[in-house]
């Protein structure tokens, strides 16, 4: 058995105060879709403008090694709602991806079969808060199962926009009419992020005299790439002034990965999302609730850099959505807890999306549910400034071919070391992600014993969680076209607004 690792939390701000908000705080959770680790100003972007998300960074704690449980959306979303790893739930791919019996791509492996719903038998975080006396609310993207398994069936009193869809639907997609069975159309041309914010504000106002749990899950910034005309024009002008100091594109497998943030449409989408965050934060201020409301923020997977328009760059991280490199799984991850977290805190401890469930229960003074949030750990010690979290490792399992060029694989991060195992050929890559955050230097050949240890721990974890594995593809033709794709992204200047692609 590997020795348990104690991670240290580096707080750049002073140690946090120990006073808690009396009376059980409210919770507002912002979940972005496909937003990259460096897509916020506070996280290093100099092109996108995000003053409201940056405000959260100033007022709360940033976890610089915050991870999604999976490099695509539905699995991570399920991990937040259930507190369990997607491998344990068998919800390992985005819901709607082809199952192995329908697989038509020329790949070495058939993807593992997966469950296309968050089971009703799971006690969601919303159900836990509801049982604790909280009013509960959901707005935006659900993508966790068909009708009968929507937010209102999983503990949310109110659902505005959450359904089976993984992206905004026609006819207007990001603009009304929405074509959404759980969101009434607004005036023609109404913008979806703003509408979701307005619905959240209405809920907050109606619930301001009792504790509430509001989950605002943006469809932004998922494809289709569509921005408000004013914001698109703003960033087209801003892009003209950019001077590149390196290549705009570099290879990543059979794909090309964007290296520069200069996509005007995407930038407009990011800013519109940020404005929606500001609308909700402004309501908390206006209703006198800001000091008794915990606010969380993260994204469900990394930014699109190798597919579907490749609108953003995750540098210095490697890869993006659909990849097990840091660009696919490391996310902007923030928690604001007034009176406890000293503003401007930065924590380097590796944390993961399953941690929100036990963390928020403890913050709210609700009883833990250890059999439910099996794969999460409460981050309250880190938020209080103790700086220690006893965790062996963080694991990933993605036994699928995504739409972005990645291949089936698994990964483990133990301490500063990260091992990726590729299931097609059993190859291992080893990186020290503290010294080499961009995963440029594969150290597997130099550290065979470490590879052996991490690989054994990854295998044991898969067995313990009942993780499903891919299988050999009997129709694979090595002389045929590569089923992982060889698609070239749209080059600079071709930033058209387009149709959505699932996943």
Image (cartoon, rainbow, N blue to C red):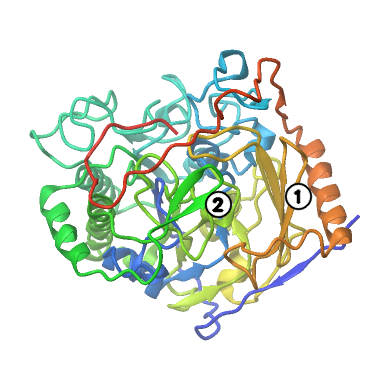
Q: Quadrant of the N terminus?
A: bottom right
Q: Quadrant of the C terminus?
A: top left
Percent position of residue 181, x then y: 28, 23
Left-right relation of 314 to 76: left
Helix, strand or loop for disc 1: strand
Neighbour class for label 2 at 10 Å: few (<14), some, many (≥20)?
many
* Residue designated by label 1: 428
Q: Given the current orientation, which residue lies at the most extreme bottom position?
A: 14
Left-right relation of 321 to 187: right
Q: Give the total of numbered labels.
A: 2
The quadrant where residue 450 appears: bottom right
Left-right relation of 471 to 164: right
The reply to whether residue 411 is in sight is: yes
The quadrant where residue 167 appears: top left
Mark earlier in primary sequence (1, 2): 2
**Which residue corresponds to the image point at 43% horizontal and 71% vertical from the top-left?**
60
Helix, strand or loop for disc 2: helix
Whether residue 130 is situated above or below residue 483 in the rendered picture = below
Q: Are marks 1 and 2 in contact (CB under 8 Å)?
A: no
Left-right relation of 44 to 479: left
**Which residue corresponds to the image point at 43% horizontal and 60% vertical from the top-left?**
25
Percent position of residue 356, x then y: 55, 53
* Residue designated by label 2: 329
73 and 80: which is toward the camera: 73
The quadrant where residue 309 appears: top left
Percent position of residue 381, x then y: 63, 69
Q: Given the current orientation, which residue lies at the most extreme right position?
A: 1
Whether residue 8 is situated above or below residue 125 in the rendered picture = below
Gap in angstroms between the C-alphas marked 1 and 2? 18 Å
373 and 352: which is toward the camera: 352
462 and 130: which is toward the camera: 462
Neighbour class for label 1 at 10 Å: few (<14), some, many (≥20)?
many
């Amino acid at each position: 058995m590997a020795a348990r690792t104690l991670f240290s939390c580096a707080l750049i701000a002073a140690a946090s105060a120990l006073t808690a908000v009396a009376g059980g705080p409210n919770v507002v959770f912002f979940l972005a879709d496909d937003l990259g680790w460096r897509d916020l100003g506070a996280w290093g972007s100099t092109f996108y403008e995000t003053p409201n998300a940056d405000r959260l960074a100033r007022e709360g704690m940033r976890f610089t090694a915050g991870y999604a449980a999976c490099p695509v959306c539905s699995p991570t979303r399920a991990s937040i709602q259930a507190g369990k790893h997607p491998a344990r739930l068998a919800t390992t791919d985005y819901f709607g991806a082809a199952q192995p019996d329908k697989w038509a791509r020329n790949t070495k492996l058939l993807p593992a079969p997966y469950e296309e719903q968050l089971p009703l038998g799971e006690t969601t975080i919303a159900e836990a808060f509801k049982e604790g006396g909280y009013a509960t609310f959901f707005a935006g993207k659900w993508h966790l199962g068909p009708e009968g398994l929507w937010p209102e069936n999983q503990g949310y009193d109110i659902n505005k926009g959450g359904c089976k869809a993984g992206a905004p639907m026609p006819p207007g997609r990001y603009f009304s009419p929405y074509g959404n069975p759980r969101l009434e159309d607004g005036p023609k041309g109404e913008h979806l992020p703003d509408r979701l914010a307005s619905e959240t504000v209405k809920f907050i106002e109606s619930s301001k005299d009792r504790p509430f749990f509001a989950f605002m899950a943006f469809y932004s910034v998922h494809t289709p790439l569509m921005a408000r005309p004013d914001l698109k024009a703003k960033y087209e002008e801003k892009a003209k002034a950019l001077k590149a100091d390196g290549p705009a594109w570099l290879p990543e497998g059979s794909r090309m990965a964007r290296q520069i943030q200069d996509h005007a449409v995407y930038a407009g989408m990011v800013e519109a999302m940020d404005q929606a965050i500001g609308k909700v934060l402004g309501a908390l201020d206006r209703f006198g609730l800001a000091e008794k409301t915990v606010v969380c923020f993260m994204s469900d997977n990394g930014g699109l850099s190798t597919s579907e328009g490749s609108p953003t760059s995750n540098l210095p991280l490697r890869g993006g959505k659909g990849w097990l490199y840091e660009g696919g799984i490391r996310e902007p991850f923030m928690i604001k807890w007034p009176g406890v977290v000293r503003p401007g805190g930065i924590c380097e401890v590796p944390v993961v999306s399953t941690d929100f469930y036990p963390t928020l229960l403890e913050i709210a003074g609700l009883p833990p549910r250890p059999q439910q949030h099996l794969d999460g750990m409460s981050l309250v010690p880190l938020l209080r400034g103790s700086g220690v979290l006893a965790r062996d490792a963080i694991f990933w399992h993605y036994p699928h071919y995504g739409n972005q060029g990645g291949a089936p694989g698994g990964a483990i991060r133990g301490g500063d070391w990260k091992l990726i195992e590729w299931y097609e050929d059993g190859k291992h890559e080893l990186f020290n992600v503290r010294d080499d955050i961009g995963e440029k230097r594969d150290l597997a050949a130099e550290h065979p014993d470490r590879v052996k240890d991490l690989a054994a721990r990854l295998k044991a974890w898969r067995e313990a969680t009942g993780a499903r594995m891919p299988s050999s593809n009997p129709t694979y033709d090595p002389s045929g076209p590569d089923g992982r794709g060889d698609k070239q992204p749209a080059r600079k200047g071709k930033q058209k607004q387009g149709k959505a692609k699932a996943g």
